[in-house]
Amino acid sequence: MHPILTLVAQRLALGVLLLFAASILIFAGTSILPGDVAQQILGQAATPEALENMRRELGLNEPPLTRYLSWLGGILQGDLGTALTNGLDIAESLGARLSNTLFLAFWAAVISVPLAIFLGLLAVRYKDRWPDKLISGVTLTTISIPEFMIGYVLVYWVSIQFGWFSSVAIINDSMTIWQKLNAIAIPVMVLTLVVLAHMMRMTRAAILNVMQSAYIETAELKGMPMLKIIRKHAFPNAIAPIVNVVMINLAYLVVGVVVVEVVFAYPGMGQYLVDHVAKRDIPVVQACGLIFAAVYIGLNLVADIVSILANPRLRHPK
Amino acid sequence: MSETLLKVRGLKIGATIYPPDEKSRDIDIVHGIDFDLAPGKVLGLIGESGAGKSTIGLAAMAYGRGGVEITGGSVEVNDRDILQSGIRDVRHLRGAEVTYVSQSAAASFNPAKKILEQVTEAAILHGKFSRREAEERAVVLFGKLGLPDPENIGQRYPHQVSGGQLQRCMTALALCPEPDLVVFDEPTTALDVTTQIDVLAAIKEAIRDTGVSALYITHDLAVVAQVSDHIMVLRMGEMVEYGTVDQIINAPREDYTKALVSVRSVQHEEKQPTPHPVLRVEAVNARYKGTSFDVLKDINVELHLGQTLAVVGESGSGKSTLARVITGLLPPSAGKITFAGRELTPDLASRPLEDLRELQMIYQMADTAMNPRQTVGTIIGRPLEFYFGLKGAEKQKRIQELLDQIELGTGFQDRYPAELSGGQKQRVCIARALAAKPRLIICDEVTSALDPLVADGILKLLLSLQKSEDVAYLFITHDLATVRAISDSIAVMYQGAVVRYGPKSQVLSPPFDDYTDLLLSSVPEMRLGWLEEVIANRKMESAGN
């Protein structure tokens, strides 16, 4: 077998193993949370008998291991359970929320990743000159300001003063794609500004590191223009570190958008999670936690595999 | 075409340096150099490191490495002063009229691109050839340079060919755009001696066939004598002597040139073995984790107190692995090692402090073997504390003694490694090893990174320390001149096995086995026509090709 297939298979197996470990952590973590779901549902006035009945009905009296295994078994069959608070199937309500979150994350990624890499390349080309300093300064500023602050500032200027985009990002299925894009324009801008700095700085650092190599000097002594050297000789060798940081930021776009979703009342995963944490709806919290873990592990797995594929020594063994 | 291809007048080159704890300042590296190069001729630039030879070579491409800047004079290529040209013109000069071959082809090839693409890149970029023509030309050059399978080798990635082959590819890269001038910057220095000779012959032939001019930069006078028409000897940025190869080699005028020609003043009488060896390696095999072949095969050697065993061979022959096994860094898979009459445990962790103290190491790269943030005093003082528990005045006194032994004065105690020259750094490493009062020091290529004259000084120091301290050396090297100079016995290694072992006088006298013959005949000799003679008389190929 090609050694690279072995490596990739190893990574995939490791990813599955990690996901199991994460499921244990999530289950254990939510199990030791204070508060009683039965009490929460029935209210302070509930009689001890009613509470006891409720607990039995929810399976809360079973030993933890049994509960974990039945939970895991359900998940493996695609059943995430039912929400305690409203009795709805979690997989169904979560599916809609997740696709909304992915929709937002996708457009933020489509804009921020190429922009960050382009700015990184530009910063390398004009290293220590004003374009470099300007790019660094602006991106550092935007990453330093809290997201909700950027959100409100953009709403004030872009939406209210100029009237370009909608200030509320509520979307539903009856909207056309253009209406949806108009609705999420400002959240996408906020997310872009938040993740831009990290990716751009890593691109800059990774390429500058490669620029020290002797083969860059070889290219310079071939009489090649600087931008072409960066594009043809430096960038292909900086892919691995850049992909890693891009994937971490993509994961952040999915998992870390809670604040932005709340600010813009966007019906995504984050808001769904926050609502149900407040209601002590453990199965929903567990399901969200597991989805977030899967996204993190999945994207980092992709980063790992791309790094392996980007290495010519692994791709073309002796 | 005009009579002079390259005309350099009053070339001055400076740089900004940043010494630790001091303000940065500008220094001059090259102080006004003049020379001409006619079409089709080869000029050898020779000197020690810091002589400015690479800097001058790169100036022919209007290029300054790092913070280096050309501060004065003129460099005319084909009657145009390239120092006055704009960046566009300079770019068109580089890679089209003047090309460059670096010391380390392994580092100078982009690991992510195929060889052919990189070899043809400049020719296509400057519109000298179409892609198709350039690729055809590259294949012809690959063949001319003696590369195997010239049709297909370009489809490989740099890591898929050997070091010697890659250096030939680099030469093809430089010749592909049909330049007028090629700057060869130590193109064979990083290669094994047996590989160097093939690459050298290939370069020489390629220069002759294409009729290109060349600047050939090296610190090895014997090498440059094989390929050049003229030689310029440089020292600290100034020209010492300029002449034909014949005149420089056979009738040098300046003292410095004479010293370069007759370097290796070290002489060492072979000692008789004693009845009790300090180190005995018996039937040792070793392999690296996760591999299925032995890197060391049935090694049997002995080393006697106060004597030197030279282990010699090409890279990959297992010499450094042998050192790793003896020090316990790589436990052997079979065999045993006896040191000072007791058997050593296989791995480092289980050895008593006494064994660790009596067996010290000195490395090739003194730079990376010292903590750059510690002073020389701290570096040498550490083993004194660790092994002998010395403190305060006692420790100071001992540090002073050691500094005297390595011929460095009191002032060096408070200096940092960055403030020392290469030779001084290696001396500090020797003092650190000596501080432990070892019976055996393993010296791994300790002079390989040094200039010949500096290396000579280090060898003299090692020999005099051997006399006064009665310490044994296991001396790992690929340099046969060094072996001749200091060893009592020699082990020649080839592909993980000792192919020849015995007292120096015996190992270095005929009849030779094929490998030792190849090794001995490959050492460049300082006479004209040596290269052709050796190539004609060879019996076997180097493993590096």
Image (cartoon, rainbow, N blue to C red):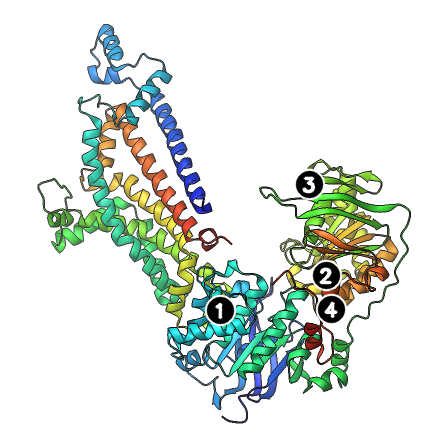
Which residue, given by chain and number where applicable, does mark 3 sit on?
Answer: B331
Distance from disc 1 to disc 4, alpha carbons, whole Å, reads: 35 Å
Instruction: Describe residue A266's horizontal placement relative to residue A287 as left or right.
Output: left
Q: Look at the numbered disc 3 and give the secondary structure of its residue.
A: loop
Q: Nearer the viewer, residue B277 or B171?
A: B171
Which residue, given by chain and number where applicable, does mark 1 sit on?
Answer: A217
| Amino acid bearing label 2 | Tyr
The structure residue drawn at horizontal position 34% and vertical position 62%, both measured from the top left corner, is: A134
Q: Chain of mark 3?
A: B
Q: Residues within 10 Å of mark 3 (few under 14, many from 20)?
A: some
Distance from disc 2 to disc 1, alpha carbons, whole Å, reads: 38 Å
The structure residue drawn at horizontal position 62% and vertical position 65%, both measured from the top left corner, is: B190
Instruction: Describe residue A177's horizontal placement relative to residue A135 as left or right.
Output: left
Identify the disc placed on residue B521: 4
Disc number lying in front (3 or 1)? 3
Which residue, given by chain and number where applicable, does mark 2 sit on?
Answer: B515
Q: Chain of mark 1?
A: A
